[in-house]
Amino acid sequence: MKDISTLTEDIYHVLDATQDHTHDPILAEQYSSRIGGEFIKASGKRDEPRAKGKLWASDLGKRCLRQHYYNFNEPHYGEKLNGNTKFKFLYGNVLEEAVLYFAEEAGHMVSSQQYTVEHAIDGWTIRGRIDAIIDNVLVDVKSTSSYGYKRYKDGITSSNDSFGYLEQLGFYREFIDTPVSKTEAGFVWIDKQNGHITYTPAITPTREDLEQRARSIIQAVDKSEQNVARYYLPEAYGKSGNRVLPMACSYCPYKDHCWRDSNNGKGLRTFAYNQGPVFFTDVVLEPRVFEVTK
């Protein structure tokens, strides 16, 4: 039996051009069909309103309760998913399928792809689909930039988990009803720019913490916007006195509406830096880069 600790080297061994590897045609056909399904799904509609009573597993990792309030009560204020964003999600899913395929080709036991996990709490249902179980270890496959890969390749903790990955994996680990090791769960990281792959085990939140998190979201949904505090606060940008949204907040589709009172009521100002757009809540000294206007 293979062990997940050798996953990276085993996948690279299959891909080694100097090796003569005999592929399983039936396995290749199965994965080809799943990838085709991802193509179809990518072009489907993804902006349906959220129905109260249902949470996704990924919701547990979104720490800002105001974002959840908007999701269920004022979704029309959110930014619509554009073509390049949907394409980004698509190739992330394709990379996931590629890693799982080559893991099987390398002799690892891969099972339960997209297995549904559900849990009921306070009249609501939390639902999500796992990526897979590899060698009896529950895994979540994440594709990331080279920067993100360097950030997570040695492990993910609450201090560097900007997007709530641990809560999502923790939900699957605590509430899955199929046999799987409870002693270990982790992430398979893919550097989508350079092709690096690694597996890291993770310590996830407890069942009690996850249920409390779900209850906080459910309670926030039934409050008014003014009574749901923002989780993130602006942070200093250099020594100019300017302040900007932190990284996780900048990814929120409701940032423009949520921060409409920033810059003395003029709203967020966006400036195009080399590393990407930066969203300013307070401009004291005018940045010397191009401003993106709405």
Image (cartoon, grey):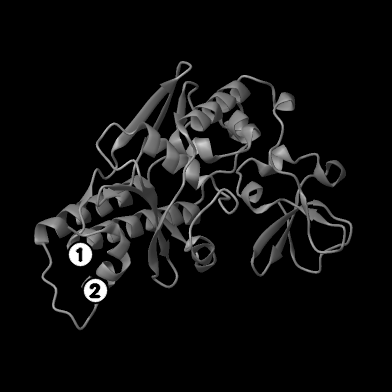
Amino acid carrying mark 2 in the image:
His
Q: What is the quadrant of residue 160 in the picture?
A: bottom right
Amino acid carrying mark 1 in the image:
Ala
Instruction: For mark 2, give the secondary structure.
Output: helix
Q: Which residue is mark 2?
A: 13
Q: Is residue 207 left or right of residue 157?
A: left
**Residue drawn where x is 24% and y is 37% of the image:** 179
User: Dot 2, crowdedness within 10 Å: few (<14), some or many (≥20)?
Assistant: some
Position above or below: 172 against 9: above
Camera-side residue of 255 and 179: 179
The residues bearing labels 2 and 1 have C-alpha atoms spaced at a distance of 8 Å
Q: Which residue is mark 1?
A: 106
Q: Quadrant of the N terminus?
A: bottom left
Position above or below: 16 against 155: below
Q: What residue occupies the far front of the structure in this picture?
A: 183
> Looking at the image, do the residues carrying marks 2 and 1 touch, with CB atoms under 8 Å apart?
yes
Instruction: For mark 1, give the secondary structure.
Output: loop
Please state the horizontal and vertical placement of residue 14, each as a whole percent of the image: 21, 71
**Residue drawn where x is 49% and y is 47% of the image:** 165
Position above or below: 85 against 285: above
Please state the horizontal and vertical placement of residue 287, each as a whole percent of the image: 81, 65
User: Dot 1, crowdedness within 10 Å: few (<14), some or many (≥20)?
Assistant: many
Say whether disc 2 or disc 1 marks the residue closer to the N-terminus.
2
**Residue drawn where x is 30% and y is 60% of the image:** 99
Q: Is residue 269 left or right of residue 33?
A: right
Q: What residue occupies the far top of the structure in this picture?
A: 123
